[in-house]
Amino acid sequence: MSLSLNRSRELQQRAEALIPGGVDSPVRAFRSVGGDPPFVERAEGAYLFDADGNRYIDYFGSWGPMILGHAEPTVTAAVQAAAAKGTSFGASTAAEAELAAMVMQCVPSIEKLRFVSSGTEAVMSAIRVARAFTHRNRILKFEGCYHGHSDALLVKAGSGVATLGIPGSAGIPMETTQFTTAIRYNDLAEVEAVFAKHPGEIACVILEPVVGNAGTILPQPEFLEGLRAICTREGTLLIFDEVMTGFRVSLGGAQSLYGITPDLTTLGKIIGGGLPVGAFGGRAEIMNLLAPLGPVYQAGTLSGNPLAMAAGIATLRQLLDGGDALYEQLAEVTSLIAHGVAREAKKAGIDLWVAGTGSMFTWFFQQGPVRNFEDASKSDTARFGRFHRGMLERGVWLPPSQFEAAFVSLQHGEAEVEATIAAAREVFASF
């Protein structure tokens, strides 16, 4: 099918002369899937509209936060009302504590939290306070889990690092990563081996409890429970990076879904209704180490920005009001989409493994199962690229990487389910 992207192509060429690669985040360049990236002009509900007038069903939702759909009226109105009073103060507002209380209502493991401006900043700060609390330096992370682009965590990371096929990043001194150990997700034996090798040295274990940055990978039975037990035994802090899963897989995040209590949690994306925001929080005795109460310094002029707080309050209020029924609706529609496309692949004789929970999922182009990044890496990325281009031509915009989760919003319904499955049927027939 023909998809006109002439204006988007012109905009990309202009951007490339001014911005490295023409993008402010690498995966947007479509290098792993091929073709021209559309330039978005606006969004509404479940749809994106590009500079060429094309409309797409959106399955990445600003990488997770648009759970209510784009330009949701109450969120938009809240941001407009806040902006009318001023866009930034660099001083405290009542909205910060209001949103903090809403987050804590949903995530009981968080006794105190602090807002920042991004998920990267939240994780960086959580690591710092964990090291201060334990008086240890070493970090244990898992291959394929992405925790932002701070130096110490770009080791065998997921997201754009996996998409581009690079092991880490240039410009990071070896000394910065010497205390970072990365091992296979879902492998408790490897966890025990690392603790045996570094007794009394590991400050924290950090992971995405449901991996979303290597495609969606679910924890195996007893994996999270095992991590919690090991960390408790060793005096190591357990950090759940729920920047992606928080308020996405359930109202209380993955920790609520699986019944695990981490020591610290990082959040982002959704708690700002799509505006730049992050947060980290956990046990009060740990969080009280932060200045001005304690010796751990962390700061940010735009932390608790009034626009992000307003959008977050409006978003969480709807999620709280909707409760279980809202999440059941999301899960049902997500299952119809994910498994409906998988059935079309099976009819066409194409290997496709589906993994997902709640309103996030991934189609891996392989037989499966996918239990860790090593498994995910066996996927046919060239075939995924063909699939992505074919779906885009038919008005369905998927995450432009085999190693990124897809997301569904409350605005996705029967029409979007049917259109997505029909588009996949046509693409598979062309393989």
Image (spheres, rainbow, N blue to C red):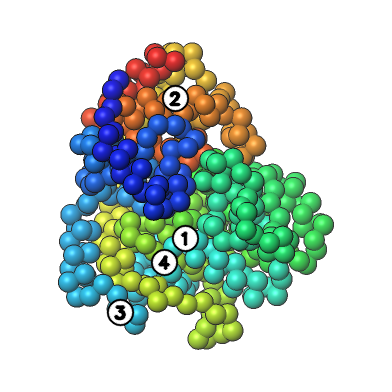
Dots 2, 1 in contact, CB < 8 A: no
How dense is the environment of label 3, judged by Cα within 10 Å: few (below 14), some, or many (20 and up)? few
Question: Which badge, 2 or 3, comes first in the chain's sequence?
Answer: 3
Kindly indicate the quadrant of the structure image that contains residue 165.
top right
How dense is the environment of label 2, judged by Cα within 10 Å: few (below 14), some, or many (20 and up)? some
Dots 3, 1 in contact, CB < 8 A: no
Mark nearer the viewer, 2 or 4: 2
Question: Which badge, 3 or 1, comes first in the chain's sequence?
Answer: 3
Would you name the residue on which mark 4 appears?
Answer: 117
Q: Residue 70 appears at what percent x and percent y?
A: 25, 48
Question: Which badge, 2 or 4, comes first in the chain's sequence?
Answer: 4
Question: Which badge, 2 or 1, comes first in the chain's sequence?
Answer: 1
Q: Which secondary structure lies at badge 1?
A: helix
Per the model, the C-alpha gap separating discs 2 and 4 is 35 Å
Q: Is residue 92 above or below residue 42?
A: below
Residue 92 seen in this snapshot: no
How dense is the environment of label 1, judged by Cα within 10 Å: few (below 14), some, or many (20 and up)? many
Per the model, the C-alpha gap separating discs 3 and 1 is 22 Å
Would you name the residue on which mark 1 appears?
Answer: 119
Amino acid identity at mark 2: Arg
Q: Which mark is residue 89?
A: 3
Q: Residue 28 appears at what percent x and percent y?
A: 41, 44
Q: Residue 214 appears at what percent x and percent y?
A: 54, 42
Would you name the residue on which mark 2 appears?
Answer: 386
Amino acid identity at mark 4: Ser
Q: Is residue 211 above or below residue 344?
A: below
Dots 1, 4 in contact, CB < 8 A: no
